[in-house]
Image (cartoon, grey):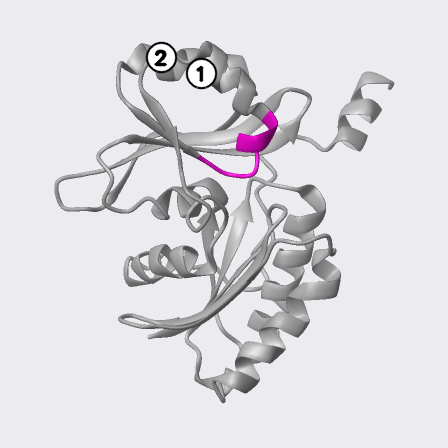
Amino acid sequence: MKIIAIDSSGLVATVAIATEDTLVAEYTVNFKKTHSQTLLPMLDEIKKMTELDLGSIDAVAIAAGPGSFTGLRIGSATAKGLGLALDKPIIEVCTVDALAMNMWGTDDLICPIMDARRDQVYTGFYEFDVNDELSVIHERFAEDISTVVKMLNETGRRVVFLGDAVPVYKDRIETEMTVPYRFAPIHMNRQRAGALAFLAMRYMREGRTVTAADHKPDYLRPSQAERERNSNP
């Protein structure tokens, strides 16, 4: 099995080529560029470096959301275009699930947080079970950061935080957390297409794919434009 994995759901753009037992290539950029500028050149570069025949892949994995509305649209359009052109299925992976996968092997409760603006984060709660499989404790949701911290405090467990909302809300977390916690180090605290690919492999074995025509991003909540339109009928 061979897949291309793509994640442009947040500030990071990351692309990988992976087989079931090898991360063949991963290209990750966290810099002040728009994903429309970076994603396709990154994909083209690793394709050339690995001499990849695109026709040889089995599927395209995409971070389907939640996340930045613009980033999700760019990533989904890229994945959909590849899937349609190559007649390959799409594997949709929840963005915060893939982020949590970065923390493989920890005993902590895992809390990835992505900045959703207006004091809110996109998040979910996770742990690794006795078989080292990622287990969802609380499915993805959008919530005020103080509410998220309160929910974590109520678990009584040590928590590890990661994601682009950590620097935004770090002071609030340090002030409001009453249970032990820590922050993931820099090589584990942002989206990684390799982690996305690992989960996508499992999903494909389970038959959890969609056609390229049927794929659409999971925004989780309405965009600001939609909220303003609904509040001013």
Q: Is residue 134 magenta?
A: no
* Image x and y of residue 223, in percent: 72, 33
Separation of residues labelled 2 and 1 (CA atoms): 6 Å
The kind of residue on which mark 1 rests is: Val
Q: Residue at x 47, y 84 (%)?
A: 50
Looking at the image, which residue is at 41% across and 48% down?
A: 188
Q: Which mark is residue 134?
A: none
Residue 45, compared with residue 106, is above or below; it is below
Compared to residue 86, the image places residue 194 above or below, namely above
197 over 87 or under it: above or below: above
Query: Is 12 on the left or on the right of 134, as rendered?
Result: right
Q: Position of residue 111 (x, y in %)?
A: 40, 31
Residue 13 in the image: state x and y as whole percent: 60, 57
Q: In the rendered structure, are the residues bearing label 2 and label 1 in contact, judged by CB atoms less than 8 Å apart?
A: yes
Q: Which residues are magenta?
A: 162-168
The residue singled out by tag 1 in the image is 149
Q: Secondary structure at mark 2?
A: helix
> Residue 153, which numbered label?
2
Query: What residue is at 49 percent from the left and 86 percent from the top?
Result: 52
